[in-house]
Amino acid sequence: MRRFILLLLGIFIIFGCSNRSENTYTPQTGKTNPRKPMAWGHKQTIYVFADDRIWEYAEPHLRKSLERYVFTNRNEQYFTVKRAPLENLDQFYKFNNLIFFCNMQSNQRVSAFVKEKMGTQVEADIQKNSVGMYPVENLWANDQYVLFLVGNNEENLLKFNILQSNKTFELFQKKLYDRIARQIYQAKVYPASKFANLPWKMQIPQNYIVYKEDPANNFICYLARLRKHADRFLSVYYEKIPADSVNREWIKRKRAELAWKYYDEDEFNDDTVQVKFYDLAGHEGWKLWGRWQNKKYMVGGAFQTFAFYHKPSGTAYLIDNSVYYPEGEKLKDLIELEVISRTIEIKNN
């Protein structure tokens, strides 16, 4: 009897693990430390600690980089930059995003604080390279991101801030994407069997339901809808073409065709969209993004579209993300949709 019970227990464990792995997805994100308290505050606010003179000259470049706009109906900012006083560090040190500036020649409060905390390896690095950027995750709280910008003197530190402004943005942008990825993939995803008849698969949370499907024309659209939240549409289309003709004109033309046909006459104007070269999940291609409108229903929203050509199969893929949310901002929803879109895998059939 004992042996029989153990056998049943083993079967339940096997099937339980199998089911869990089939319906869950763990994204590749930065490290977390659950032994520490969770970081606080708004995930798109960055608090900056800098001495007065450093802040005076660093602030404009920092804001220009981190507070850049995303082209939606409201032109939303990625981040908001706020200066924080060091004397109130005990109120801020567990917030989500922090930046510290340190001039090694200065004994002012912020620089002195950073010099006191940093190790000898950082000091040796600055002596050798004059400047340095040091990101630290989970320093004082779980899921926290702290960036130290250090220079051997004021001039080099300020120049470094300007030269590395895009890098600074990219680091915090990646952290934002990671946080959103961990949040959305707490939900179960569709198992691989759902994509058995398709040449591609994707890690799509099960709160996204099939909204429209046209197998004969290689199109499927998923919709996530929740009260007091944005409607999020994710669609995938593919077609066999003889040569790599996926370019900025193709993505605009094809997106216009699909939106008109499957989104009940959605459209966009050339002067409200942008196109750029883009890499999605290792596939080099294009990104189109901007505003959509529907004159039939007098509504509009924001969208982004990715397109690439898969040479081994001779197939062009177009992944469209569309958001409808008149009441609020759409950037976080666009990021969520892109996070999901990045999980696309083309099968080796």
Image (cartoon, rainbow, N blue to C red):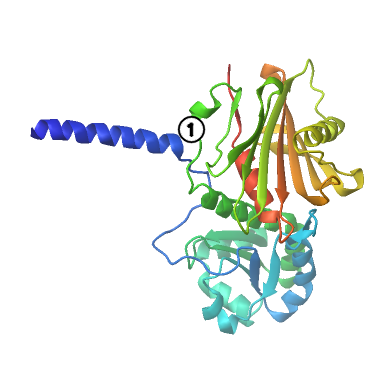
Of residues 326 and 201, the one nearer the viewer is 326
Label 1: element kind: loop
Give the amino acid type for the residue marked by disc 1 in the picture.
Answer: Pro
Q: For the point 52% across and 51% down, which residue is it?
A: 182
Q: For the point 48% across and 49% down, which residue is it?
A: 186
Residue carrying label 1: 191
Tell me the quarter of the picture where residue 72 sits. bottom right
State which quarter of the image contains the C terminus: top right
Tell me the quarter of the picture where residue 155 sits. bottom right
Q: For the point 78% across and 38% down, which residue is it?
A: 264
Q: Is residue 110 above or below residue 305?
A: below
Indicate the position of residue 172 as horizontal and vertical percent values. 64, 57
Of residues 315 and 86, the one nearer the viewer is 315
Indicate the position of residue 330 as horizontal and vertical percent values. 71, 55
Q: Residue furthest front?
A: 297
> Could you tell me if residue 310 is visible in this image?
no
Indicate the position of residue 183 as horizontal and vertical percent values. 53, 53
Question: Horizontally, is 217 left or right of 266 in the view?
Answer: left
Question: Horizontally, is 160 left or right of 41 in the view?
Answer: right
Indicate the position of residue 12 as horizontal and vertical percent values. 26, 35
